[in-house]
Image: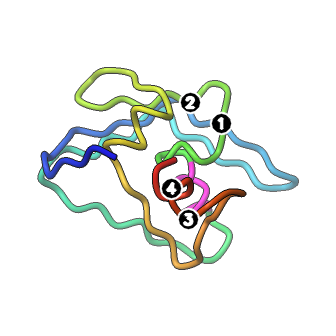
């Protein structure tokens, strides 16, 4: 798996998720290179859902992920960004398949 330590501009657009009584809508969120962003909020406020969208782990039909102003696919995103959760998010398959997804 190719890795890079190069900083990137990351933007997510058009997030619109509804799950039961929960709704998360984000028109645009820009995370400029060289900055640190903290997501704070109570349990159930959508922090993990937003991170799932950024990590392209949650499929939203409208959401777009841009790296350095270029829209990227889930596969391209997985080679450039890493999202680490408190609880592991593993898919079926080997450890190597999960690490390189």
Label annotation for residue 63: 2
Label annotation for residue 41: none
Q: Secondary structure at mark 4?
A: helix
- Disc 1 and disc 2: Cα gap in Å? 7 Å
Whether the residues at callouts 1 and 4 have beta carbons within 8 Å, the answer is no
The residue under the point 52% across, 78% down is 86
Q: Based on the picture, tell me whether residue 49 belongs to the magenta stretch.
A: yes
Front label number (2 vs 3):
3
Res. 60 image quadrant? top right
Label annotation for residue 16: 1
The residue under the point 22% across, 62% down is 36
Q: Secondary structure at mark 2?
A: loop
Q: Secondary structure at mark 1?
A: strand
- Disc 4 and disc 3: Cα gap in Å? 21 Å
Asked if 26 appears above or below 48 in the picture, the reply is above
Query: Bounds of the magenta span?
Result: 46-52
Q: Nearer the viewer, residue 85 or 23?
A: 85
Front label number (1 vs 4):
4
Main SS of the magenta segment?
helix
The residue under the point 36% across, 29% down is 66
Question: Which residue in the protein does label 4 denote?
Answer: 51
- Disc 2 and disc 3: Cα gap in Å? 28 Å
Question: Which residue in the protein does label 3 denote?
Answer: 95
Query: Relative to 31, is 44 on the left or the right?
Result: right
Front label number (4 vs 3):
3
Measuring from the top left, give residue 44's x and y in whole percent. Answer: 68, 69
């Amino acid at each position: 798996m190719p890795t890079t330590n190069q900083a990137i501009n990351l933007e997510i657009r058009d997030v619109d998720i509804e799950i039961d009584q929960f709704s998360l809508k984000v028109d645009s969120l820009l995370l400029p290179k060289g900055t640190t962003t903290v997501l704070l909020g109570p349990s159930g406020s959508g922090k993990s859902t937003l991170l799932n969208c950024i990590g392209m782990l949650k499929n939203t039909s409208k959401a777009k992920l841009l790296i350095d102003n270029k829209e990227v696919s889930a596969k391209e995103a997985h080679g450039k960004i890493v999202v680490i959760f408190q609880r592991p998010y593993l898919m079926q398959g080997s450890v190597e398949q999960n690490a390189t997804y």
